[in-house]
Structure formats: structure tokens, C-alpha cells
Amino acid sequence: MGLTGPRASALSVLVFRGSLTMSQLAEAEQVRRPTITRLVDGLERRGLVRRVSHAGDGRVQLVEATAAGRRLLQKGRARRVERLRGGIVHLGEEDQQVLARAAELMEALRG
């Protein structure tokens, strides 16, 4: 994707959780506010996120993924899924069944 791990992680949070304040994003990423500010600045320069005013409180700024950010993340995910799929087809049937059961268990944990 051409992003550092921390930038990709922050973008992923914004794509899948939606718009967040800088403080909420910092908390989700388990980093301090200055760190998240630098990450968001870099993503913003690439056109992957933007800052917008909160609809209910104009003093609050939210960070949201742009369409370009969502596309980039979805393309990266599709490449990872395809690589996994390519590896799985080379496994034996028993190993594929083990992976299928593990996927079922992980999905059940998501609730």
C-alpha cells in the first residue's frame, strides 16, 4: 500500500470504525496525541484522510477517510486475501479443514 505500519493501522481504524476525533483515534491506536497528529498529517498530505467539523459541535474536528483512502485500504486487503487464498489451495484437505474450523471459532468470538 505504500504506507508505514502505523499509518496503515490508523487509516484502517478510520475506514472500518468511521470518523473519530484525534483523541479517539489516538486511544484506538494506543499512542499519544502528538504521535497521532503526525500520522494524520502524513495521511492528509497523501489525500487519504481529511479533517471535518463535527455536525453537532463546530469546535470539534473529526478525522475521516477519503474515498481514496478507502480504496487504497480495500485494494491492500484484496491483495492480502488473494495471497492467503493462493497459499491455502496448496494445503492438504485436513489442513484446510483445520483452517475452516479456526475461522468459524474466530467468527463466533466476534459475536
Image (spheres, grey):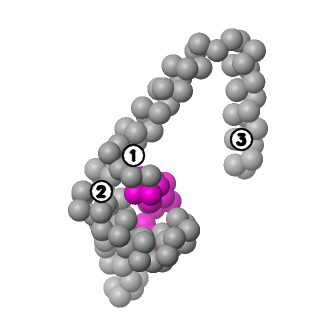
Q: Amino acid at mark 2?
A: Leu
Span colored in magenta: 6-21
Quarter holding the N terminus is: top left
Q: Which residue is mark 2?
A: 48
Q: Residue at x 40, y 57 (%)?
A: 7
Element assignment for label 2: loop
In the image, residue 15 lies in the stretch drawn in magenta: yes
At label 2, counting other C-alpha atoms closer than 10 Å, the crowd grade (few under 14, some 14-19, many 20 or more) is: many
Give residue 65's position: percent from left, percent from top.
Answer: 36, 59
Q: Quadrant of residue 72?
A: top left
Closest to the observer: 42 or 15?
Answer: 42
At label 3, counting other C-alpha atoms closer than 10 Å, the crowd grade (few under 14, some 14-19, many 20 or more) is: few
Say whether residue 55 is visible. no
Q: Quadrant of residue 42?
A: bottom left
Q: Do the numbered discs 2 and 3 sit on residues whose CB atoms are within 8 Å?
A: no
Residue 14 relative to residue 27: left or right: left
Q: Which mark is residue 36?
A: none
Say whether residue 103 is visible. yes
What is the distance, in whole Å, between disc 2 and disc 1 at their CAs? 10 Å
Q: Residue at x 69, y 19 (%)?
A: 96
What is the distance, in whole Å, between disc 2 and disc 3 at their CAs? 30 Å
What is the distance, in whole Å, between disc 1 and disc 3 at their CAs? 22 Å
Give residue 110's position: percent from left, percent from top.
Answer: 69, 49
Q: Which residue is mark 1?
A: 73
Q: Residue at x 37, y 65 (%)?
A: 39
Closest to the observer: 106 or 6?
Answer: 6
Give residue 89's position: percent from left, percent from top.
Answer: 58, 15
In the image, residue 58 lies in the stretch drawn in magenta: no
Q: Main secondary structure of the magenta part?
A: helix
Q: Which residue is mark 3?
A: 106
Q: Give the mark nearest the N terminus, 2 or 3.
A: 2
